[in-house]
Image (cartoon, rainbow, N blue to C red):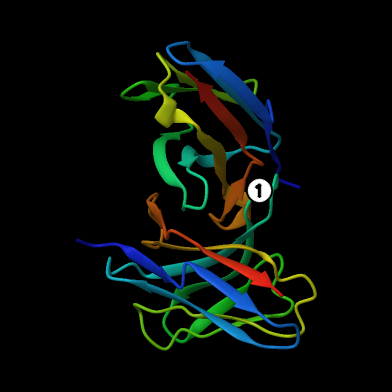
Amino acid sequence: KNQVEQSPQSLIILEGKNCTLQCNYTVSPFSNLRWYKQDTGRGPVSLTIMTFSENTKSNGRYTATLDADTKQSSLHITASQLSDSASYICVVTFYNAGNMLTFGGGTRLMVKP
Amino acid sequence: DGGITQSPKYLFRKEGQNVTLSCEQNLNHDAMYWYRQDPGQGLRLIYYSQIVNDFQKGDIAEGYSVSREKKESFPLTVTSAQKNPTAFYLCASSIRGKYGYTFGSGTRLTVV
């Protein structure tokens, strides 16, 4: 069964600090891997999307990396801001799932002043 | 501006009632999806539709129904058969075979 697991489940950091969120998936090959940001009570918003041939993608202070050999991705947030407080969701599209999305459980990030 | 609109934002339902959640998109996307999100869990697929007048069950379709009479619209009905309907519901759309997924802002359904 295709699975996507994220760690940690929750994280608290101080404003201005960096942090890294992890995503492991169990099945390959996959079509693409995405990171979404979801504010409380809102829909997810896309941050990055990477194909299996890409190993890094940046979007402002967000940088996603992908290691297809170890089946791991990470999302690095630089110089965190209070507005970064949200859930971050890793999503994988697996070829054997008809291009449907498989979602991780998310990491809840809280940035404190 | 193009986008995907869900309504209402909050919905309260009495036990035994059916309720319908609205999802409309003006992105000219072929495919539309309904997901359910519970606290601490990943999104789970309820139903999806790749083209008008066609839809498929997702992983947790029991107690839900959908229709796709227009390309722009994909309403979800939560029936009285759904035993635990309290959740956050997200609608999404995409172009078939393409990467981009756009999510709506969600509807929070509470059974009272």
Q: Amino acid at mark 1?
A: Gly
In the rendered image, the vertical position of residue A19 relative to residue B96, given as above or below: above
Q: Residue furthest top?
A: A17
Q: Residue furthest left?
A: B1
Residue sitting at 69 percent across and 67 percent down? Answer: B86
In the rendered image, the vertical position of residue A22 relative to residue A46, given as above or below: above
Image quadrant assignment for residue A3:
top right
Q: Position of residue B16 (x, y in %)?
A: 75, 88
Q: Position of residue A93 (x, y in %)?
A: 54, 46
In the rendered image, the vertical position of residue B91 relative to residue B61, given as above or below: above
Residue A71 seen by the camera: no
**Left or right of residue B5, residue A26 in this image:** right
Residue sitting at 55 percent across and 37 percent down? Answer: A87
Q: Which residue is mark 1?
A: B42
**Left or right of residue B49, residue B59 in this image:** right
Q: Residue furthest right?
A: B83
Q: Nearer the viewer, residue A4 or A53?
A: A4
Q: Position of residue B68 (x, y in %)?
A: 46, 84
Residue sitting at 45 percent across and 19 percent down? Answer: A77
